[in-house]
Image (tube, rainbow, N blue to C red):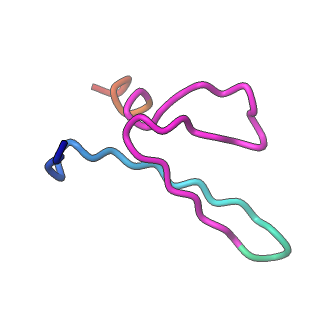
Amino acid sequence: MIQTLTELVTFDEFILVDGEYQAKLFRNCDRIESPIFPELNLTPKQVFAKGQ
């Protein structure tokens, strides 16, 4: 399936590791993984849908 840019929802997570930030990108229906909130069960699409 090809998605248009208006359908692409992304969420960037930045984690400080050894004094440098590492970025992880989550798209649309990827489960957001968080070392701080391991029980978090949300996708970027769900996060941004709440604001509409």
Q: How many marks?
A: 0
Residue at (80, 68) in percent of width and height: 17
- In the displayed orientation, state which residue is furthest to the right: 18
Residue at (48, 48) in percent of width and height: 26
> Considering the image in quadrants, where does the C terminus appear?
top left
In the image, the segment drawn in magenta is 21-46
Q: Is residue 34 magenta?
A: yes
- In the displayed orientation, state which residue is furthest to the bottom: 19
Q: Is residue 18 left or right of residue 51?
A: right
Q: Is residue 5 left or right of residue 28?
A: left
Residue at (34, 27) in percent of width and height: 51
> Considering the image in quadrants, where does the N terminus appear?
top left
Q: Nearer the viewer, residue 26 or 49?
A: 26
20 lies above or below 41: below
Image location (x, y in percent) of residue 45: 37, 33
Q: Is residue 41 left or right of residue 7?
A: right
Residue 48, by quadrant, is top left
Residue at (75, 33) in percent of width and height: 38
Majority SS type along the magenta span: loop
Q: Is residue 29 magenta?
A: yes
Image location (x, y in percent) of residue 44: 43, 37
13 lies above or below 30: below
Image location (x, y in percent) of residue 11: 46, 49
